[in-house]
Image (cartoon, rainbow, N blue to C red):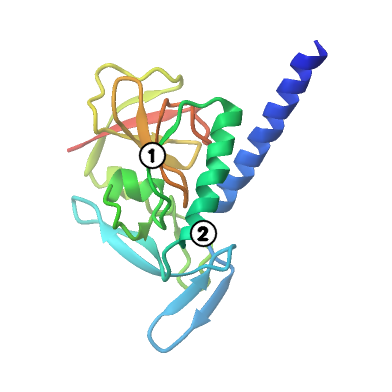
Amino acid sequence: MKVSISKEIKKALCLVLVLLAVISLSSCASSTTVTNASMTTYLNSHGRSFKLSSVTTPKGSTVQTCTYSQALTKEEKGEINRYWSDIISKMKWDAVKKGEPATYNCHSYAWYSQSSTNKHWINQYRLNPSTGGITTQANLSKYWTDGSYSLIVRKTNLSIPSNVPNGSVVFYKYGDHSAIKYSASQFRSKWGFAGVYQHSPGCAPYSTSTLEYYKKT
């Protein structure tokens, strides 16, 4: 019994570390701004500078993005890969890395572009242009509220519906995460600054209480 409790405690502590890491990388919100003649530059919590930009949905709605001035270094990528490799092993997830760390995020990967040259980080909510701080104004949801995508089904369990075609976008409604359905049992998604991973719905560091499946119209 003691051995079993010890393992559970270790797993719980590991999960706490995962959640803290995800929270720190879940948005490019800023509390620091540097204004020059042309554009305001913001600093995220890690001191990495970014500027506000935008992309458009297939129906033409403007979605606010962040673009970072510097790519991740080789050393940063190595550190990120090692960190998540250790977490995946400890959590016994089936996640396999399929793409390298970069400065675009899960929402950008799933809704905008899967290209490795993607430079846009998309927040679920808009940032305040004056401060760089997060607001409650809709941003990501424009992809489905403007009719670019339509809801196929909403699920509160981890089984992937058979009527959802591969390539559909999956929104973790209460996990601030997006993924792409890759196969009958697997998703592909990008984890913050970390790489792109192929994984089962529950083998990623995000809440899976409600998953929404969308198709492009």
Q: Is residue 73 above or below residue 2?
A: below
Which image quadrant is residue 185 in?
A: top left
- Identify the residue at horizontal 50%, vertical 38% (top origin): 175
Left or right placement of residue 23 versus residue 107 in this view? right
Q: Say what secondary structure mark 2 lies in.
A: helix
Marked residue nearer the N-terminal end (1 or 2): 2
Residue situated in front as seen by the camera: 53 or 14: 14
For disc 2, the marked residue is 75
Report the residue marked by disc 1: 189
Q: Amino acid at mark 2?
A: Glu
181 vs 122: above or below: above
Percent position (x, y) of residue 206?
52, 36
Report x, y in % for residue 22.
Answer: 56, 45
Q: Quadrant of residue 187?
A: top left
Placement of the N terminus among the 4 image quadrants: top right
Residue 54, image x, y percentages: 31, 63
Picture residue at 50% right of the left edge, 46% below the top:
81
Of all residues, the one furthest to the right in this rendering is 2
Label 1 Cα neighbours within 10 Å, binned few <14 / some 14-19 / many ≥20: many
Q: Determine which of the numbered discs, if any, sits on residue 25 in the image.
A: none
User: In the shown orientation, is residue 95 left or right of residue 89?
Assistant: left
Query: Alpha-carbon distance for marks 1 and 2?
Result: 22 Å
Residue 135 in sight from this viewpoint: no
The answer to whether any part of residue 86 appears in the image is yes
Look at 30% across and 57% down and name the residue there.
118
